[in-house]
Amino acid sequence: MSGKITIDDINAIRATAKPDEASVRLEDRKVFGARVMALDACLDGATIVHAARRFGVPRNTLSRMIENALRLDASHARIGYRACVPHMRFTQSDRNAAIVPASPHAFAIDAVLNAVPGLRELVESYRGTLPSKTKRSPRFDRVHAQFIKVLSQQGYGNMYPLNTGDKGRRPLIRYIKRLRDGAQAELTAEVAEDPSATRIEHLFTIRPFDRVEYDEHTIDIDAWVAMPMADGSLRYEKISKMWLLSIIDVGSGAILGWRLVTGRKYDRHDVLALFAEAMAPWVPRELSQSEMQYSPNAWMPSTYLTDNTVARSIMVAMDNDSTHLAKQSVDNVMDNHMGILHFGRSGMGEGRPYIEAFFKKIEDDLFRYVAGGYSPSTDVNEKQITSTLEGKKYPVLLEVFEDLVDTYVTAHNVTSRSTREPRSPKRLIDEHLASGAWVWHAPGAARNIRQMTVFRQRVTIRGSKKKGVPPLVYLNHARYRSPKLSGQWDLIGKEYDATYEDWQDVRLLTLWKDGKRIVTLHALAPYSACAHTLSVRLRAARWAKHPEAKDQESFDVTDNVLAYHDAVRKAATGIKDSAARLAAGEVPNARSTQKVEIETPLKGMRQGVTSMRLR
């Protein structure tokens, strides 16, 4: 495509109707859907290269689609989204230059109809049924006989299609079907988008902090992670997936917060912790690698404070992933972030196009070039290795990798973007604040941040006066007790609301009744020695039930969480692919005696950097 598409071109294409998917051949519907999404992405500001890679549409095809979408058809109507229909023609051959071909070729029947006067009108005027393998159509037989008669009278008896076995019968049937499919697509086309009902940005202009989008993105990587050993050395184990959770401001394109998760899947605590971090002022990280630096103008929107509070968005758009776990996330975001919650369908990236565009950009700019990075295979492309560095020789250190992501995000927020006229997200927010526009700074931010990650549940007081078991609570493999409950046998069997006040330390459990705090219980051994999250608790409980946990070497460790961490270090020395499996919460199998020696460029790293943080 030559030249740039203008805003008038975008509006002209958007004003056209989208063909109904039912009018597209079944085998072409997947390709048709990908082309529509790629065209929409280009209209939203994505480049042809990025849109083509993201949706698996060849770049030259996408470029040609945009050119066709701007053209007018024979009836002088804009082609628009009809350009996305596979195998559809939008131009007709010049009848004066058309000739009857001697042999079949692509669209040869069109050339015949253009070359012989009156033949096209004869065929296109046919309104009867078409024959099939099981049913004849006498009416079509008469039209076909007339078709042969006209060509024979014109002296084309030895030309195509009369020189074929069926004398053009099947090409005529296919042509009439194609003609009717095109007409049906126009008749059953969807009504053009109603701005007030489908897209909020069509209803009014989205300004900074009006709407933010949250989503998560899986990162495919063929890399190795450096696991710390009990003796202080490192062990390298293969990983194949990471998760990036992000929040982006639609009006400015600024990244408000991010979180990196290694393992099979993130959980609700990661989601809520991300929102809590986005509501707190940003503080630059103490970079682990001496050669790594922040951009001189590194910036996050949470550094702009009014009354010591961070600006919040009026609307949050997030997806419906893991619906059986999403209720807590939805309740906490509504109660503590407040504002409007747009809770959309999982897997429908069209509802959050801005953050999807960011994920694509950070993949192309950063993750694809980390050692072991690659572009996964799609329907049209095979797997492509994008990094020149071998993952085994350049293992991932999680803290250093998080430093790398933070430096990228803070630089992204101050970098001009061509889709913003071009202006950086920081400049857009600065101009918005300078205009005197209202920005929401909700009071009670400290309490909201603390309550954002609170885990609520219902518990029952257990115990037995007869057996001398004091009142306590059994929850998530742990026993919770408090001296204040001693002797209160009448509480046994009663139910209370319970919360983990700090998701990073679930040793403390608070009981509530009618909104009033009753008592705070403490976890007993073997879950009392060190602070831990619920995810680590569950992994430790699974490890405690495994036969290897009965190893004599572990008897001196009284706390299950410490025993689990000790098991992680020991198991990592001999289990194949243990990093990904342990991070996913799986119990290790029998140890292997095989050892792997790998060269690594870790010199210059500050002491203490290599500690791996388990959630």
Image (spheres, grey):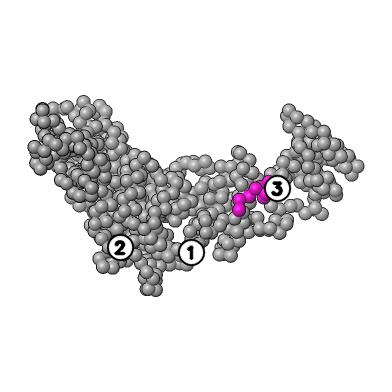
Question: x, y percentage for residue 283?
Answer: 25, 60
Horizontal placement of 58 versus 407: left or right?
Answer: right
- Tag 2: Cα neighbours inside 10 Å, few (<14), some, or many (≥20)? some
Amino acid type, residue under disc 3 in the picture = Ala
Q: Which quadrant, please, contains the C terminus?
A: top left
- The x, y position of residue 325, in whole percent, is 34, 42
In this view, the mark in front (2 or 3): 2
Q: Earlier in the sequence, mark 1 or mark 2?
A: 1
Quote the CA–CA distance across marks 1 and 2.
23 Å
Circle 3 — which element?
A: helix
Instruction: Look at label 1 and name its amino acid.
Output: Phe
**In the image, is 206 to the left or to the right of 488?**
right
Residue that mark 2 sits on:
442
Q: Residue at x 25, y 52 (%)?
A: 451
Q: Is residue 612 above or below residue 14?
A: above
Residue denoted by label 3: 183
Instruction: Name the residue type under label 2.
Output: Ala
> Where residue 226 sits in the image (x, y, percent)?
26, 42
Q: CA distance from mark 1 to mark 3?
A: 35 Å
Where is mark 1, residue-wise? 204
Q: How many numbered dots are placed on residues in this image? A: 3
Between 557 and 398, the residue placed more toward the observer is: 557
Per the image, label 2 sits on a secondary structure element best described as loop
Q: Residue at x 28, y 36 (%)?
A: 585
Give me the residue at 51% from left, 47% from top. 55
**Which of the two discs, 2 and 3, labels the residue nearer the N terminus?**
3
Regarding residue 480, the answer to whether it shows in the image is yes
Rendered location of residue 427, percent (x, y): 39, 68
